[in-house]
Amino acid sequence: MLVRFAVLAFAALVSLGPVIAAEAVKPILDSAEKHKPAAIRLWERLVNIDSGTGDAEGLKAVGAIAVDELTRLGAKIDTISSAPAAGDNIVATFTGTGKGKVLLMAHMDTVFARGAAATRPFRIERGRAYGPGVSDDKAGVVIAVAVLNILQDLKFKDYARITVFLNTNEETGSRGSRALIEKLAKEHDVTLNLEAGRAGDGITIWRKGSGTIKVEVKGRASHAGASPELGRNAVMELAHQMLQLSRLADAGKGTTINFTVVKGGDRKNIIPDHAEADADVRAVVTDEFDRVERELATAIRNKLIADTEVRATLIRTFPPMPQNAQIDVLAAMAQRIYGEIGKKLNLEGSGGAADSSLAAGVFRPTLDGLSLVGGNAHTDQEYAEVDSMVPRFYLLTRMVMELGRNPKNDQ
Ligand SMILES: [Zn+2]
């Protein structure tokens, strides 16, 4: 009941936001345009620093640039160790005179190894920016800084708190940041995650959760030629287990199970006594992870080779961010704001997990995909649309303005 009331109250407060007059749009767009060249220079500096997860030196360099920018804008900076992950998370707090508390999240780490930036440094070609992490998620840092510059231009202080959180280890599951993200999400009214906008100019209104099934088989070694009958082939048993565990997927519910890593055997003439495999698991709702975990335990008892030992566990990484009433309200607001500059915003979902799932996991209103429009993440064809800078700066600035202005709305 309390939850239902909270959603309704939240809906009333954010959907009845002011319809902004045309003359009020212009100063924001002008400021966005003005900050674009500096934003591109910042972007180039950030992309040209390798900061793969675990790269302490690179993360430190990226963090120092971000801290410098945010300090100049008047933020109070806290750096918090992201152990066991390398580097320090950054929490930059801006205090205003209004009532709303808005959390902006982005991450400094990329999936690319040292050397990637030297091989293919930041470049713009036919309206697209390229380089390691250009859209996932260096653009997220850039848009956060740009929006705070725009708010400063507008002398906008009508918020209680705007916090920029920069993560060091999103790409490996945010183990070193999870508690901090959950704490920050709870401290704010709304979390806006600055992962890339979807390729067709969309935002992300739901995400699948992610996990790993780890399967381990113990068998018995034996000479494959002289006495194969004395062996218990762990690789054969693993093959059987992978096939049957894959069938716990449920296409209708969007639950996928894909075995992606397999290890077993090292000599052709020895029956292997050990084999293991990892499967990538994704689901739209937590119930599905519960079901897979339950059925896993039963399924592995059905063995191909009786005397082998099979163990399987489900390790959960990110919870799902299911579409819900709070997200619908924020998405409608984003679409309305984008409409102010004559643009249409698509609402999409993603099979990829992200930090927004952690904020949503503690039941806070969360929206994602609010950075620049981009695509091909995690590949050397990763790009972001340079022409999306001004419209996306506008969108995020206006969202922060409306959410800042609003009273604390869901308690
Ligand atoms: Zn990523």
Image (cartoon, grey):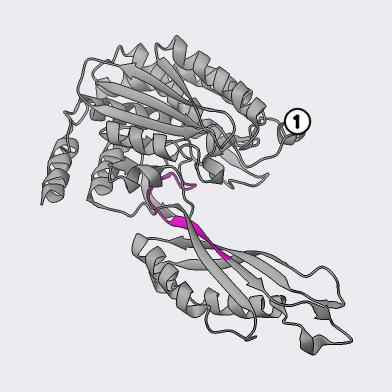
Quadrant in the picture for residue 57 = top right
Q: Nearer the viewer, residue 154 or 138?
A: 138
Quadrant in the picture for residue 260 = bottom right
Residue 185 placement (x, y as % from top left): 33, 36
Q: Is residue 314 visible?
A: yes
Residue 316 placement (x, y as % from top left): 46, 56
Residue 131 placement (x, y as % from top left): 65, 35
- Residue 305 lies, with reference to residue 190, above or below; the image says below
Q: Is residue 212 magenta?
A: yes
Taking the image in four quarters, ligand 1 sits in the one at top right
Span of residues in magenta: 198-214
Q: Secondary structure at mark 1?
A: helix
Instruction: Give left or right: position of 44 versus 22.
Output: right
Residue at figure coordinates x 38%, y 65% from the top left: 290
Q: Amino acid at mark 1?
A: Ala
> Which residue is labeled 1 in the image?
118
Q: Nearer the viewer, residue 294 or 121?
A: 294
Residue at figure coordinates x 32%, y 42% from the top left: 366
Q: Is residue 347 magenta?
A: no
Q: Nearer the viewer, residue 69 or 228?
A: 228
Residue at figure coordinates x 47%, y 61% from the top left: 282
Residue furthest toward the bottom?
229
Instruction: Give left or right: position of 381 versus 300.
Output: right
Q: Is residue 285 visible?
A: no
